[in-house]
Image (spheres, rainbow, N blue to C red):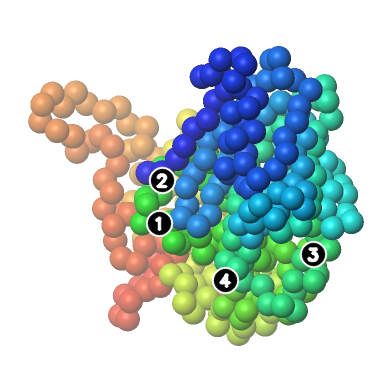
Amino acid sequence: MLTETVFRTEDLGRAERFDAWRECMRRTVAPMEVTSHRLADFAASQRLLHLGRLSVWASTVQPCRYRRGPRDIRSSDPELYHLTLVLPGSGTLATAQAGNSDASHGRDIYLIDTSRPCEVWSPPGGSPVVGIGMEIPKPLVPLSPLLRPHVDRLLGRQISGRRGFGLLLAQTLVQLVGGEPGYRPSDVPRLNALLADLVAGMLAQESETTAGLPAGTRDRTLVLRVREYVRQNLRDPGLSPVTVAAAHHLSTRQLHRLFEAEEETVAGLIRAGRLEAARRALTDPARRAVPVHAVAADWGFTSPAHFSRAFRAAYGAPPGDYRRRAFAPRPDTGRRGTARGGALSRKGDERLPGPGRRARPGQASAGGQARPE
């Protein structure tokens, strides 16, 4: 599990709560002035994930005003970019920095530079602000001097978290603070690199230029965009490497070259995504009456025979048998362990190369026939 710190005003006496929150924000971001009209019944909570040089934190807080002025900057400047993703149902957050001002609502992101005076506030009497903040050192964000003047124009402005890299960043932040299992302290360097690339990609996209991104960052962020595009279009039977390349203004040769270092090809990514979505649908009690061929068609397979072959290669059983075994009652096994007729064997998951993965030389790919690349 990742290291985290939890702050809750409900753990403190009423007279201590606001002062404690003010100190919490100064520690988390940078020295600043914090004021509120809700001192008597002030409430706030924060769950902070420590990610090495980065920090990500979810919070719910009564309306406040945060001001970082020249004196605060002279006192201490950690040279960070601060980003907040405002979550649906949150109160409004207004921002002002570098001559820009804007208001952020649910699924919006705003960007602040700790090296410049800024102000962030929510209207007195408004709803509590619910969001996810992130502090990332500016040198960690892979931007060239060519791009930084463009980024300066985004300070204090609303950035959409509903599309492009803003959406990818928002989804990653929500997953991180949602307590998803599987992340270990040893994953922190990879999470740092992923978040830094997503921030750089978002800023470049909002600046309508990628010229200031290093080549490696451009490629990694483009791979993330392609993966998200595939995920959102799996139901389209026409989805193929050709259409994916066209949607990203690439030739198919460029697209394949982009994925050379990845674990799967683009065709494999499409096939694996469709198969996994179909597998989940087949084992969903709410869709038990839906015929197998209809499930296959719902996830972009135009040939029932091809779907059956690909599914069996990936999961070790034809789709109909897989579904029957998933819903079969488990016999009482007593103390003798799991009976054969119980839960599905994982052998299909263990076979190499698995759905979507590159086949080793001499080994058939898991999807049978794939769409032409």
* Number of residues whose C-alpha sits closer than 10 Å to that of mark 4, classed few (under 14), some (14–19) or many (20 or more): some
- Disc 3 secondary structure class: helix
Q: Is residue 78 above or below residue 248?
A: above
Whole-percent x, y for residue 17 in the image: 61, 22
* Number of residues whose C-alpha sits closer than 10 Å to that of mark 2, classed few (under 14), some (14–19) or many (20 or more): some
* Number of residues whose C-alpha sits closer than 10 Å to that of mark 3, classed few (under 14), some (14–19) or many (20 or more): some
Task: Tell me the mark number nearer the camera, choosing from 1 and 4.
Answer: 1
**Apparent side of residue 308 relative to residue 201 in the rendered image (left or right):** left
Name the residue beneath numbered marker 4.
Answer: 220
Distance between the alpha carbons at the discs numbered 2 and 4 = 24 Å
Placement of the N terminus among the 4 image quadrants = top left
Distance between the alpha carbons at the discs numbered 2 and 3 = 32 Å
Distance between the alpha carbons at the discs numbered 4 and 3 = 23 Å
Q: Is residue 43 above or below residue 211?
A: above
**Amino acid at dot 3:** Asp
**Residue 187: assigned label:** 1
**Amino acid at dot 2:** Leu
**Residue 2: assigned label:** 2
